[in-house]
Amino acid sequence: MKKLIPLLLFIACAQEKPKITLLEKQEFKEMMAQDVQLIDVRTPEEYSGGFIGTAVNINYNAPDFKLQISKLDREKPVLVYCAAGGRSAKASQILDSLGFKSIYDLKGGYRSW
């Protein structure tokens, strides 16, 4: 029985729902209708050229990026995107490391929009 307990704990942890989900455009759009935090991690110059919905710009390349995103609500889902998906994937990892519960990344970024 003692050997079984660590195995059961491992199985339970392995079945935990992933916190970061890559979404296609349509799924991302549907999520935007919910109570979420929509974050554009592109540069202010990119953001000024157009953005999705009511997205807030938090520049991934800014020296205080981690500090800025740490002010967001960790319990509320976060939808994140960049230009093509690279920066948002890295930003999603940072959000995860900070303890955010639900992170949704737009596949293909703004260009796919």
Image (cartoon, grey):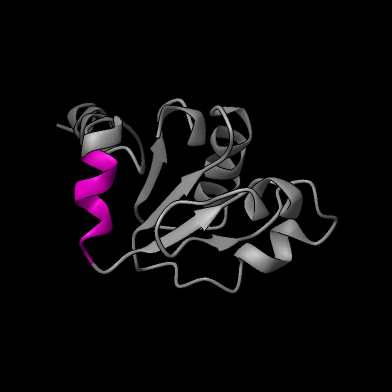
* Residue sitting farthest toward the right: 63
* Residue sitting farthest toward the front: 49
Q: Is residue 9 visible?
A: no
Q: Which of 9 and 101 is in front in this view?
A: 101
* Residue at 34 percent of width and 52 percent of height: 102
Q: Is residue 72 left or right of residue 113?
A: right
Q: What stretch is highlighted in magenta?
A: 27-34
* Residue at 43 percent of width and 65 percent of height: 54
Horizontal and vertical percent position of residue 35: 26, 69
State yes or no: residue 30 in magenta: yes
Please state, as top left, top right, bottom left or bottom right, where the N terminus lies in the image. Answer: top left
* Residue at 60 percent of width and 44 percent of height: 91
Please state, as top left, top right, bottom left or bottom right, where the C terminus lies in the image. Answer: top left
State yes or no: residue 82 in magenta: no
* Residue at 44 percent of width and 51 percent of height: 52
In this rendering, the answer to whether 61 lies above or below 37 is above
Horizontal and vertical percent position of residue 13: 29, 37
